[in-house]
Image: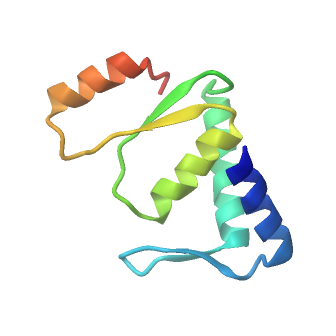
Amino acid sequence: MHLLNAVARQVRRAPDAVALTDHRGTRLTYAELDSRARAAAGALRALGIGPGDRVGLVLPRTTDLFVLELAVLLAGACFTPLDAAQPPDRLRTLLTRASVAL
């Protein structure tokens, strides 16, 4: 939970500072990152995701991926990053082996 604590500290210290920039030019401040991650965590909890669950994430390396990684952690779950370039059969195998809930 060190990552969650570090992000929370930065949100308090410098909410308007840029937290993330991706290759598309998307920029998020710490306040925006926190707001989006908390909203997504709430949506995950509403879907029944919680402590001990695993969530598969198949997204490009963008600010959205990091927001969802934080959201999964805030929900108490863990995530399995997956490469969308993998063949569908391989992705299904990885999802099965990881026992993802979502």
**Residue 68 on image: x %, y %:** 54, 49
Residue 77 lies, with reference to residue 38, above or below; the image says: above
The image shows residue 76, relative to residue 32, as above or below, that is: above
- Quadrant assignment, res 77: top right
Residue 15 position, x and y percent, is: 77, 76
Does residue 74 appear to the left or right of 44 in the view shown? right
Q: Depth check: 64 or 90 in front? A: 90
**Residue sitting at 60 percent across and 40 percent down?**
72
Depth order, front residue of 59/94:
94
Question: Where on the picture, by quarter, is residue 24?
Answer: bottom left
Looking at the picture, how far across and down is residue 97, in whole percent? 35, 17
What residue is shown at x 42% (from left), y 64% (from top)? 62
| Left or right side of 55 for 13 | right
Left or right of 35, for residue 25: left
Q: Quick one: quadrant of the N terminus?
A: top right
Q: Residue at x 64, y 41 (%)?
A: 73
Spot the residue most to the right.
12
Tell how many labels: 0
